């Protein structure tokens, strides 16, 4: 039976507008909006949003649930990870299905379908990691685009695991130029990094902080530049993931100044954390090992500037959690064996709201980089990423006045530490609707595994 829900009296914020409005929902979609109090709508359920923001559910376009890495698995399942996402005001994730070398893209995608099916609390979609570029996998890319898996991630890093050489990258880019797919790039010179890792370990430099030392800024910038040039040769758009360094932003800005279809993403860890965290004593720095690595604090200004000038368009999390005990500890005595990844899917919307209060971005830019642009970038808009008639009723009531302290004691991610432990912030999710169904009700979880559905994506909407 259809339930009509009215959200009344809140400040509706989208990427383009802010207005005090009432929002009417039916059959899982927004059916009407009007200036607050101007319409006398009847509804089965009325949600009072006074003194709160009414914002689109977040779209986190970069997560890794259950990812196999470094002899272990990311600690969040699709069930725990999507529940934590909902607690943090994110209502859609785009996770990465993985092709195993020697196997087909189809096998990898089917494995991820099986992991997620019936387990997600919110809606989900997939990118495809291509780690074995050959004639068969190139042909498979065409079918995946038609299936709604319209973006393909390649790695210039991790030789022997995900790495593709320049020739393989070019061939995949050429294929994407014909089928409309978007190429996503992990831009670090992995071959050179492996040399530096070997040399550091030979010198006895084994602590977590050396993970940042060997994955040098210049090797991120060089790979970013090379990826851009290969994309130009192939005539294909390029999306560079987890940009962490000023020099890499400069490469993206130079390409965009030429009018090239080049896009960049950064993550909260690069905006709020630094090499100071990697250097924490007693192996605590292992908690902060991710790739690209955390950078010296002075890079943060360039990342915020890039977000303001639109040289960076998206903030995703690269959520890939490993517990400190038993997982991060695999790298005691050898930083290269620390599983790479940080937890963050629950913290992104709150940290970016704090950035609004700190003067880094505007409220509408918050919604743009966390909701609307990732939805457009990956073919989900306007179904996701906005509040408008016809859009899915993925809506968050956000209390901009509530204060909280981020802590592993209170978070819902399946990991034994918080990367932002003890950080005081203002702003907190109050209520979350996913396709009109309440999954967080005034700080109570009312969702369920299996509510979340696979979303078929179109191609990038910026082309």
Image (spheres, rainbow, N blue to C red):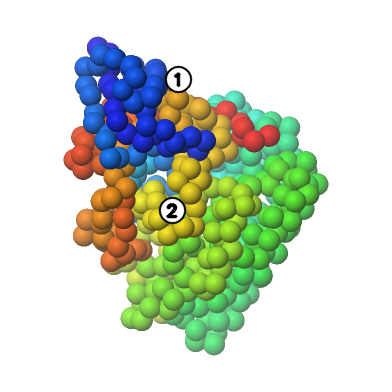
Question: Residue 329 at what x, y percent from top left?
Answer: 35, 70
For label 1, the crowd category at 10 Å Cα-Cα, with few meaning under 14, some 14 to 19 and many 20 or more, is: some
Is residue 180 shown to the viewer in this render? yes
Q: Are marks 1 and 2 in contact (CB under 8 Å)?
A: no
The residue closer to the viewer here, 349 or 18, is 18
The residue at the point 64 percent across, 36 percent down is: 462
Residue at the disc numbered 1 = 390
Q: Is residue 93 visible?
A: no
Report the mark closest to the observer, 1 or 2. 2
Report whether 287 appears left or right of 379: left
Of residue 356 and residue 89, the one placed in the foreground of this image is 356
Image quadrant containing the N terminus: top left
Residue 172: percent from the left, percent from the top? 69, 43
462 up-or-down from 217: above or below: above
Percent x, y for residue 20? 37, 32
| In the rendered image, the vertical position of residue 328 relative to residue 228, given as above or below | below
Marks 1 and 2, how far apart in space? 29 Å
Which circle's residue, 1 or 2, is located before the other in the chain?
2
The numbered disc on residue 186 is none
How many numbered discs, if any? 2
Residue labelled with disc 2: 356
Residue in view at x 21 percent, y 43 percent:
443
The residue located at (27%, 21%) in the rendering is: 5
User: Does 102 sit left or right of 177 as displayed?
Assistant: left
* Residue at the far right in the pictured view: 233
Residue at image coords 56%, 45%: 129
Choose top left, top right, bottom left or bottom right for residue 117.
Answer: top left
Percent position of residue 331, x then y: 41, 72
Q: Quadrant of the C terminus?
A: top right
């Amino acid at each position: 039976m259809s339930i009509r829900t009215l959200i009344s009296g809140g400040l509706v914020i989208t990427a383009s507008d802010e207005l005090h409005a009432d929002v009417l929902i039916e059959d899982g979609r927004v059916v009407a909006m009007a200036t607050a109090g101007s319409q006398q709508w009847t509804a089965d359920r009325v949600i009072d949003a006074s003194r709160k923001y009414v914002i689109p559910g977040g779209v986190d376009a970069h997560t890794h649930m259950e990812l196999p890495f470094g002899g272990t698995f990311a600690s969040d399942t699709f069930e725990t990870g999507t529940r934590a996402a909902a607690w943090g005001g994110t209502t859609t994730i785009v996770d990465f299905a993985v092709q195993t070398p020697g196997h087909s893209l189809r096998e990898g995608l089917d494995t991820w379908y099986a992991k997620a099916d019936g387990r997600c609390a919110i809606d989900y979609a997939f990118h495809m990691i291509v780690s074995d570029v050959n004639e068969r996998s190139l042909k498979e890319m065409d079918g995946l685009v038609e299936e709604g898996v319209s973006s393909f991630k390649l790695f210039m890093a991790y030789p022997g695991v995900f790495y593709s050489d320049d020739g393989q990258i070019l061939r995949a880019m050429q294929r994407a130029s014909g089928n409309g797919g978007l190429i996503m790039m992990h831009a670090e010179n992995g071959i050179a990094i492996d040399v530096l890792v070997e040399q550091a370990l030979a010198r006895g430099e084994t602590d977590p902080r050396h993970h940042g030392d060997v994955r040098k800024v210049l090797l991120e910038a060089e790979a970013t530049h090379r990826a851009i040039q290969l994309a130009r040769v192939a005539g294909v758009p390029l999306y560079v993931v987890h940009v962490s360094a000023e020099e890499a932003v400069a490469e993206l800005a130079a390409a965009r100044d030429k009018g090239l279809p080049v896009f960049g993403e950064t993550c909260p860890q690069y905006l709020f954390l630094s090499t100071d965290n990697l250097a924490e004593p007693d192996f605590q720095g292992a908690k902060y090992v991710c790739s690209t690595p955390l950078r010296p604090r002075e890079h943060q200004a360039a990342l915020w500037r890039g977000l303001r000038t639109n040289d960076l368009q998206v903030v995703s999390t690269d959520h890939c959690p490993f517990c400190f005990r038993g997982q991060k500890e695999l790298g005691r005595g050898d930083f290269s064996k620390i599983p790479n990844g940080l937890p963050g899917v629950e913290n992104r919307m709150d940290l970016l709201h704090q950035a609004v209060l700190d003067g880094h971005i505007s409220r509408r830019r918050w919604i743009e980089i966390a909701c609307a642009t990732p939805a457009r970038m990956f073919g989900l808009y306007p179904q996701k990423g906005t509040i408008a008639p016809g859009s899915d009723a993925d809506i968050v009531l956000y209390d901009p006045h509530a204060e909280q302290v981020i802590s592993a004691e209170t978070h819902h991610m399946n990991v034994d530490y918080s990367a932002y432990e003890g950080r005081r912030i203002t702003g907190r999710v109050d209520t979350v609707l996913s396709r009109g169904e309440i999954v967080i009700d005034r700080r109570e979880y009312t969702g369920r595994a299996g509510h979340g559905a696979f979303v078929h994506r179109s191609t990038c909407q910026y082309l």
